[in-house]
Amino acid sequence: MSSSLRTSLPFTLALAIIVYLVATFIPAGVFSQATALTLGVVIAGILVPLLVEYKPLPTTAATKVQKATNAAVSGDTATLYVGNLPYRANEEAVRELFQQSGAVVNVRLMKDRQTGRRRGFGFVEVSAKDANKMIQKLNDFEFEGRTLKVREAKERQDSEDGEE
């Protein structure tokens, strides 16, 4: 079950019960039961997303580890390029894989701008002292059926073709 569904399900059930009770016990002269039910469903459809959106989400263990790691890495950092990632891999899975070899500061997986799908590569910002160890351990490592390519990221160079 997805986390958003797990979060909204209790609100949806509670509002459905309230709508049912209101529709059942409304006197016939005020509204018809069908009108009361429709009005209740519309109100519940508006309230459930609002209640879910404003409900504070509990911090997960991964978030706590990430904050602790970010605090622990106060020195130099290095950015690693990670290629040939499985398209279904998410930032959390990549972070867990790299944290087995050292301190991870940030994970960015690239997505296609038009489709929003992952492009199969990303960047992992790590402690500089752990970077070489991660490259040696994780380059050509089998991850979710794909062989990763890990190396130090190169600086992005803007091409100035128009100026010659």
Image (cartoon, rainbow, N blue to C red):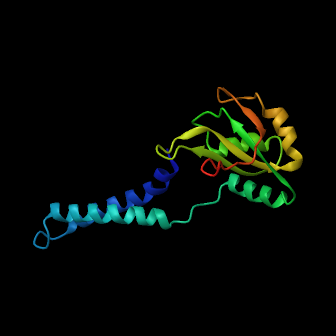
Q: Residue furthest left?
A: 29
Q: Residue at x 46, y 51 (%)?
A: 5
Q: Residue furthest front?
A: 164
Q: Is residue 108 left or right of residue 87?
A: right
161 or 164, which lies in front? 164
Q: In the displayed structure, would residue 19 be above or below residue 158?
A: below
Q: Is residue 149 left or right of residue 55?
A: right
Q: Quadrant of residue 44?
A: bottom left
Q: Quadrant of residue 71?
A: bottom right
Q: Residue at x 58, y 38 (%)?
A: 119
Give how far across and how far down residue 66 sits, in percent: 73, 55
Residue 6 makes an appearance in the image:
yes
Give how far across and how far down residue 109 sits, in percent: 63, 45
Q: Quadrant of residue 20?
A: bottom left
Give how far across and how far down residue 30 sits, in percent: 13, 73
Give how far across and how far down residue 42 sits, in percent: 27, 63
Q: Residue at x 61, y 43 (%)?
A: 90
Q: In the displayed structure, would residue 103 be above or below residue 18?
A: above
